[in-house]
Each structure stands twice: as structure tokens, then as C-alpha cells.
Amino acid sequence: MNSPRLSGIMPHLSLLTASLLWASSFIALKLAFVHYHPMVVIAGRMVVGSLCFLFLPRVFRGVKILKEDIRPLALMVLVEPCLYFIFEAKALELTTASQAGMITALCPLMVSFAAFFFLGERLTHKNVAGMVISVAGACWLSVGGQGSATATAPNPALGNFFEFLAMVCAAGYGILLKQLTNRGYNPLFLTALQAFAGSLFFLPALFFPSTVLPTAFEPVSAMAVLYLGSVVTLGAYGCYSFGVSRIPAGQASSFINLIPVFTLIMGMVVLNETLNGQQYIACFFVFGGIFLSQHRERKPVPATVTK
């Protein structure tokens, strides 16, 4: 039997894992794009994810899709992965992985306020303050980053704009995901649905004249695609879906602010990037804001009436 304390921690651990895996996806995408066209990478990622779910038949057992849920399900897979991956791929062609990761700091505020208006989720003063602090910390991370164009980031400003559009899609996905999990849909089933829908959406792009098909096997880029399709697609989306199904969408989305921190740390290890003093302080603000935004007001315990 699971202890109540463990049950309470699991959603947060799942969201932490999802943020870590999503941060690694920025690095993996950059490595994959070195040799493979973005549409090849995304289509390959979706196909690998779909194949992985074929070995998990239990995910589809007992699933009944209601007629009234077809529209939100279709809208969910449209905004993510379809539109989201298009914008993110374009962003990472034009900007650095670190800067793209930093733009994700805008997503929690979008989700939290959308959840307030559309889902009726409450926002306490500490929730708002924590989110603002973590967003400010994530944005501060970019102060020490290079904004000038480089060979791997020819137009950072435009790339960051495309990443912003991706975050708009991610915010819409977060709200739809919360609605669907509230209606009883298995988080892993929703993740599988995204993978199969993404495969159908992106595979035709391989036949576009603008898509350059690979002519040689590149080990690093190929392994990056396999990693994105298996570990990130199953792990990140599965963990995030589970976390969102257990705690309010606004609080769950605040974990996205960990992505810039994890991205920079991985950049130091994989891409030989460095952090300056300001960025270390900014990381502290991100973690502190995340902790503060998870605060929940305790309901007052009614006084016992004695006779």
C-alpha cells in the first residue's frame, strides 16, 4: 500500500523528471539537426514514439472515447505535437538551445492564468509571487547569454519568437490535457495518441521538395532521434500527463521553469557552455520561485463543538 506522503510526492517527482527530459530534448534536437533535416528528425521522433507504444498494449485497453471529447482530443494533438514541433524546430534552426529553453519560462504564467479563466483554478498570492519570481529568474538566465548571430544560431531574435509561439501551443496543450485527464482519460493513452497523430501529421513532410532526406547514417544524430522518440516522448509527456492529472494545471506548469536551468547545466556538460555569476543567482531564483508557487493554503479546521 502506498503511503499518503509518497502519493503526494510522486506527482512532483514526475513533473521534475518531465522538466529534466524536456531540457535534454533541446540538446538532442541540436545534435540531430547537425546532420538531419528538421522534418526528418521530427517525423523520426514521432515514428519511434509510436513504435514504442505498440509494445504497451495495456495503454489502450478499456479506453472509450466519447463523442463530446473528439474535438478537445483533436485540438490537443493539433497544438502539441503538430504545431508545437513545427515552431520549436524552426526556433532551434535560428537560435541556441539555451535561449530557446529560456523562453519556456513564459509558459507557466500562460497556463496558470488560462487555468484561472477556463478551469476555475484558484491562484493564491504566493502562487502568483512564486511564478513571477521563477519567470524573472529564468529570464535573468539570458542576460549572460550571447545574443549575437552565430553559425548555429543565425537569427536568435526570430528563433526566440518561434519558441514563444511554441509556448503558446504548450499552454493550450496544458489546459486541454487537464480537462481530458479530469474526464478520466489515462495520461499514457493521451501521450500515445499524440505520438500516433504526430506520425500521421509529419510523415508526409518527408516527401516535400524542401525536405532533404539523409544520405548517410550519422551515429550521433541518429541516436539523438531515437532518444527523442523513446525517452523524451514516452518519459517526458508521460510524466507530465501524470503530474497534471494529480495537481492543478497552474502548479504543474510552474515546473517548466526548471527547463532553462537544466538546459544550461546540460549545455555545460555536452556543449561546453559556461555559467557566469549572474546565471547561478538566476538559477537560485528559478528554484526558489518553483518552491514558493507550490504553496497551498490550508483550509481552516472547524472548531470542535463540545456539549
Image (cartoon, helix red, strand yellow):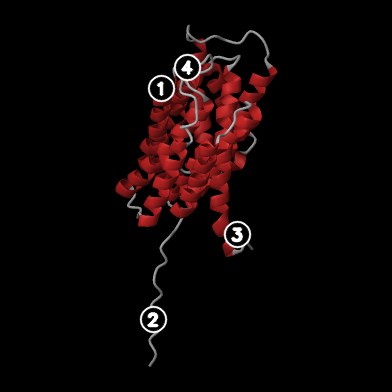
| Relative height, residue 305 to residue 142 (above, below) | below
> Distance between the Cα atoms at labels 3 and 2?
29 Å
Q: Earlier in the sequence, mark 2 or mark 4?
A: 4
Query: Which image quadrant: the C terminus?
Result: bottom left
Would you name the residue on which mark 2 appears?
303
Q: Nearer the viewer, residue 296 or 289?
A: 289
Residue 112 placement, left or right of 239: left
The residue type indicated by label 2 comes to: Ala
Would you name the residue on which mark 1 appears?
157
Outermost residue on the bottom side: it is 307
Q: Nearer the viewer, mark 3 or mark 1?
A: 1
Q: Earlier in the sequence, mark 2 or mark 1?
A: 1
* Label 2 SS: loop
The residue type indicated by label 1 comes to: Ala
The residue type indicated by label 4 comes to: Ala
Question: Dot 1, how many residues are within 10 Å of its Cα: few (below 14), some (14-19), or many (20+)?
Answer: some
* Label 3 SS: helix
Would you name the residue on which mark 4 appears?
149
* Label 4 SS: loop
> Distance between the Cα atoms at labels 4 and 1?
9 Å
* Label 1 SS: helix
Outermost residue on the left side: it is 117
